[in-house]
Amino acid sequence: MTRLHNPTGKLADAPDAVLAERAGDGDVAAFEALARRHGPLMRAYARRLARTYDEADDVVQDALITAWKDIGSLQDGTAVKAWLMRIVGRRAVDAGRRRKSHGNVDEQPETADKAPTPDQAAVAGSARQALSTALARLPEEQRRCWVLKEFGGQSYEEIAEALGISAASVRGRLARARTTLVKEMEEWR
Amino acid sequence: MAMNHTQDCGRHIEDLSDYLDTGASPDAEHIDHCPQCQARLAGLRSLNAAAMELLDDDVASASAGDTGWLDGILANLKLETRAGRSIPLEGGDMEDLSATEGSVIAMVRAVGDSLGGVLIGRCRLEGDVSVPGAPVEVNINVSARYGYQLPSLAQELREAVLAQILVQTELNIAAVNVAFTDMRPPLGDGTRNAEAPESTEEGKQ
């Protein structure tokens, strides 16, 4: 599929900081350019945090709505990517909370029931496929911490705030997640 | 329950992760010489490498196929615009006419973007725009393309913006201030309209 034409071609190679400034001034096209540039990363991140792909797309939508409302108050436009990722992380955690309060899902660890995409099938047998499988087997609370840290680049404090737990608990969960993941990766080898 | 994260040598995986992240540890002397710690560090490094590969894969599959999912989200966002402050216009006997700050800033962007080499960033109207006749300064951040003379570019931009604001509004413009906050690399040859053809996202099988 061909690339969608950019309404103003000049935005295509504009740096994030300029786009963020324009979006902050209400320029929809600039915000759109940012969303198209970082949307795939936001979606990939949301997919690892959410239960299903549909939930992930809802999370990205919520995140973009929030971002559009708040981007005028973003101080450092060069940090817009990290800022977008933080919003996705928070929205994904919120979505998980809503899901739990609506459904009566037990506290048992949830395993992701994601059908492998053709891309994933193609890399079966690789280290990343082994990691993907191991991640899916982690208890959700550990997987979340690990994904927020490793894919979202968030600090212990940010993760703690998003999850409503202490930074020490984040450290503990991450340690357990890493221990399990390292072990499973070693067994795979 | 077994304490999996405790090493026989007493070191925790958290300490090793921190060492890996920061490159420093008060316990570096031990870690550097402990075979167990070294083995765990190697495991963590492999995990990090696999994580980066997995993320790349995930991003590739998230952007595979059409962009319909994003188009729908973005279409909804367009319904909401930001108006900013209201700017009065003297419209004779009619109801008090007004423009909005947002519309003036959008106009400045459109004027600036129509000039070669200029991409407007943030634009601010400083002054009390809601009081007729109050002096207002227009502050504009600009991303410029290499190869353009900045002083003449700034002058051209100031004149174009001022002219357009005078036509469209009754603002008393005291100054148009242009700040070049970013420089972008030149575009190969004179093909100004075919911007950024170098990003070849398709063609990847």
Image (cartoon, coloured by chain):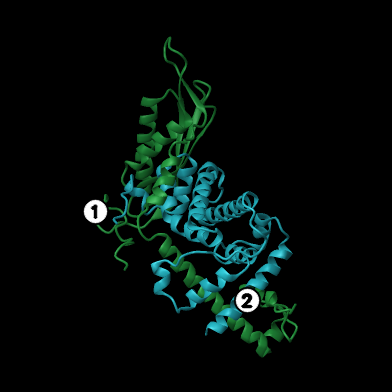
Chain colours: A cyan, B green
Q: Nearer the viewer, residue B83 or A133?
A: A133
User: How far across and down, in percent of the image, does residue B180 sit?
Assistant: 44, 48
Q: Secondary structure at mark 2?
A: helix
Q: Secondary structure at mark 1?
A: loop
Vertical arrangement, residue B203 with respect to residue B132, above or below: below
User: How far across and down, in percent of the image, does residue A132 sit?
Assistant: 51, 71
Crowdedness near tag 2: few (<14), some (14–19) or many (≥20) residues, C-alpha within 10 Å: some
The chain containing the residue under callout 1 comes to B
**Residue of label 1:** B190
Question: Does the image show residue B143?
Answer: no
> The C terminus of chain B appears in which quarter of the rendering?
bottom left
**Residue of label 2:** A180
For the point 43% across and 70% down, the residue is A120
User: How far across and down, in percent of the image, does residue B203 sit?
Assistant: 29, 65
User: Which residue ends up furthest to the left in the rendered image?
Assistant: B190
> The N terminus of chain B appears in which quarter of the rendering?
bottom right
Crowdedness near tag 1: few (<14), some (14–19) or many (≥20) residues, C-alpha within 10 Å: few
What residue type is disc 1 on?
Gly
For the point 49% across and 64% down, the residue is A114
The chain containing the residue under callout 2 comes to A
Nearest to the eye among marks 1 and 2: give it: 2
